[in-house]
Image (tube, rainbow, N blue to C red):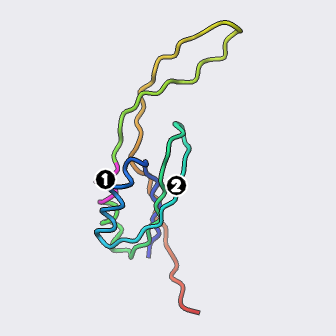
Amino acid sequence: MKLMIAVIQRQDESALTRALVSHHVGITRVSSKGGFLREGNVTLFIVVPDHRVDDVMQDIRKHCYTRTKFVAPLPPVAESGEFYPSTPIEVQVGGATVFVVDAAVLGRA
């Protein structure tokens, strides 16, 4: 058994979870926020047999993709009364970060 931990953008959550559920893959979802852009993320915990890892990765690749976004950088520290307009920076956001680890299967007590 494998535990897959997938951190994805909130925009990709709906399509990915629908695909996983349609393929009879159970998920546990945790909302999170942070990172460079301080945007909403979703962390999915997925436990699957070893032979299903590639299928789940295929769904993740299909439904989680990168986007281009323009963000305003923080203004530099300036003397009182000075103003430095900042130029937006183009950054890539989205995609998925996936960790796959062995999961121990516990027997009944």
Name the one closer to the observer, 44 or 61: 44
Counting from the top left corner in percent of width and height, residue 79 is at 70, 9
In the image, farthest residue toward the right = 80
Report the predominant secondary structure element of the magenta stretch. helix
Q: Residues within 10 Å of mark 1 (few under 14, many from 20)?
A: some
Nearest to the eye among marks 1 and 2: give it: 2
Q: Quadrant of the N terminus?
A: bottom left
Image: magenta residue range: 59-64
Q: Which residue in the structure is indicated by mark 2?
A: 31
Q: Position of residue 47 (x, y in %)?
A: 44, 72
Quadrant where the C terminus is found in the figure: bottom right
| In this view, 40 is above or below 46 | above
Magenta span has 60?
yes
Q: Mark 1 is on which residue type?
A: His
Q: Pointer 1 and pointer 2: residues touching (CB < 8 Å)?
A: no
Q: Which residue is mark 1?
A: 63
Q: Amino acid at mark 2?
A: Ser
Q: Position of residue 105 (x, y in %)?
A: 50, 82
Of the numbered discs 1 and 2, the one sitting upstream in the chain is 2
Q: Secondary structure at mark 2?
A: strand
